[in-house]
C-alpha cells in the first residue's frame, strides 16, 4: 500500500517522519514526487492543485489533513472515493485554547486596557463573573462542540446554533433559521466555527451583527468568506465593538488589489487589534487521531454529492438569509 502526502508547504518531511514512526511498513511519497500514479492507494491532502487527485486511478481513500475541507470539496474533478478528516472527537486542544484566549480577552476588556496603557491613562471597566457573560458558538461539529464545552467548564453560559435540533450536555441549543436571531440576541460574545458552504458564505453580515447585543464581540475561527467585510467595517465605523480573528480573511485582504478600505485599515481607525492565527500548529501531525477514525468513512453514492465522514452539516448549516 502506498500513501501520497500532500501537506501544507514546508511540512512534508515532518509528516513523512511521523508516518514512518507510526507505520514503518507504509510506503510514503511526498507530492510532487508521486512515482507511478496507479500505485497510490491513499492520498493525505493538506494542499494540492485542483484536478491533481483525478490522476490516481486506483485511489481508495482521501484523508484531509486540515479541519476545513471546503477547498478539497470544491475540486470539480475530485474522485468519487471515501473522504475522511483528521478530527479527534474530543476536539483540538490548541483550538480550545485559542477560543478561550480570545473569549477571556473580551470578557475582561483587555483591548480597552491595552489601549488605555498606550495612552498613559488609568481606567477601570466593569467586572463580570463568567456566569453573567453569555457566549454563542455557531457550529457544533467536533471542534465547535469541544470549544463550547471548554467555555462552559469555565462558567460561561454557552449556547450553540446548528441546523438540526440536537442534545448537548451543558450547552443550550438553538437550531434552524427561526431561532437564529434569538441565539444572536443572547450572545455577548459570538464565535464562528461553521464549515464554509454555499449556505454559510457571508453569514456574518449586517443583519447578523445588528442582531447582537450592543457592545458584543465577534471572534471568527472559521473562514474569511463567512464574513462580509464591508458590513464589519461599517459596524466598526459605527464604533460598535467587534473583533475579527481569521487567518484566511487576513490573507485574502492582504492579497486584494485597489481596495478603498480593508478590515486592517478599519481596525486601525478604530484602534482595534487583529492578532495572528493562534489555532492549529500545521507542522505538528497527530497520527493517533488521524488513523483511529478513518473507519468512519463510507463509500459515496454515485448519484449523491460527496461529503466527508465528518459531514459539514454536523457543524450546522447557516440560513441563506439571516
Image (cartoon, rainbow, N blue to C red):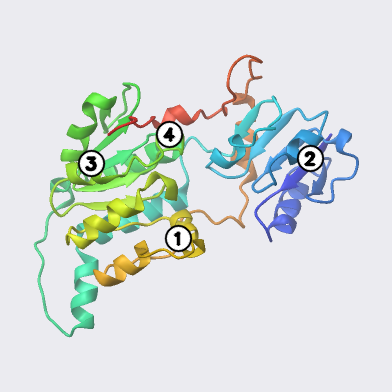
Looking at the image, tell me whether mark 3 or mark 2 is earlier in sequence order. Answer: 2
Q: Are marks 2 and 1 in contact (CB under 8 Å)?
A: no
Q: For mark 2, what is the residue?
A: 3
Horizontal side of 163 relative to 277 (left or right) equals left
Quadrant of residue 98 in the image? bottom left
For discs 3 and 2, the disc positioned in front in the rendered view: 3
For discs 2 and 1, the disc positioned in front in the rendered view: 1
Picture residue at 65% right of the left edge, 33% below the top? 76
Front residue of 206/179: it is 206
Numbered mark located on residue 157 in the image: none
Horizontal side of 78 relative to 317 (left or right) equals right
Mark 2 secondary-structure assignment: strand
Query: Image quadrant for the C terminus?
Result: top left
In the rendering, at what x and y percent does residue 320 appear? 34, 30
Numbered mark located on residue 141 in the image: 4
Horizontal side of 88 relative to 286 (left or right) equals left
Amino acid at each position: 500500500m502506498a500513501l501520497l502526502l500532500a501537506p501544507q508547504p514546508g511540512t512534508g518531511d515532518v509528516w513523512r517522519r511521523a508516518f514512518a514512526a507510526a507505520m514503518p511498513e507504509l510506503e510514503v511519497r511526498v507530492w510532487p514526487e508521486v512515482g507511478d500514479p496507479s500505485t497510490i492507494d491513499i492520498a493525505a491532502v493538506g494542499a494540492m492543485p485542483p484536478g491533481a487527485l483525478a490522476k490516481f486511478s486506483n485511489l481508495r481513500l482521501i484523508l484531509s489533513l486540515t479541519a476545513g475541507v471546503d477547498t478539497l470539496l470544491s475540486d470539480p474533478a475530485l474522485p468519487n472515493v471515501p473522504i475522511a478528516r483528521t478530527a479527534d472527537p474530543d476536539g483540538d486542544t490548541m483550538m480550545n485554547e485559542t477560543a478561550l484566549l480570545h473569549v477571556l480577552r473580551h470578557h475582561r476588556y483587555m483591548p480597552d486596557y491595552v489601549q488605555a496603557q498606550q495612552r498613559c491613562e488609568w481606567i477601570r471597566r466593569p467586572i463580570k463573573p463568567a456566569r453573567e457573560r453569555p457566549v454563542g458558538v455557531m457550529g457544533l461539529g467536533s471542534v465547535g462542540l469541544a470549544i463550547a464545552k471548554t467555555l462552559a467548564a469555565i462558567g460561561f453560559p454557552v449556547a450553540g446554533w446548528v441546523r438540526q435540533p440536537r442534545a448537548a450536555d451543558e450547552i443550550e441549543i438553538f437550531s434552524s433559521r427561526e431561532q437564529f436571531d434569538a441565539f444572536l440576541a443572547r450572545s455577548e460574545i459570538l464565535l464562528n466555527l461553521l464549515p464554509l458552504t454555499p449556505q454559510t458564505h457571508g453569514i456574518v453580515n449586517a443583519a447578523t451583527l445588528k442582531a447582537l447585543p450592543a457592545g458584543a464581540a465577534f471572534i471568527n475561527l472559521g473562514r474569511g468568506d463567512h464574513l462580509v467585510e464591508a458590513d464589519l467595517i461599517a459596524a466598526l465605523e459605527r464604533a460598535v465593538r467587534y473583533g475579527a480573528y481569521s487567518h484566511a480573511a487576513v490573507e485574502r485582504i492582504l492579497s486584494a488589489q485597489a481596495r478603498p478600505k480593508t478590515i486592517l485599515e478599519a481596525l486601525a481607525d478604530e484602534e482595534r487589534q487583529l492578532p495572528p492565527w493562534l489555532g492549529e500548529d500545521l507542522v505538528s501531525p497527530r497520527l493517533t487521531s488521524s488513523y483511529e477514525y478513518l473507519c468512519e468513512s463510507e463509500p459515496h453514492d454515485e448519484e449523491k454529492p460527496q461529503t466527508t465522514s465528518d459531514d459539514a452539516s454536523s457543524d450546522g448549516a447557516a440560513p441563506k438569509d439571516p
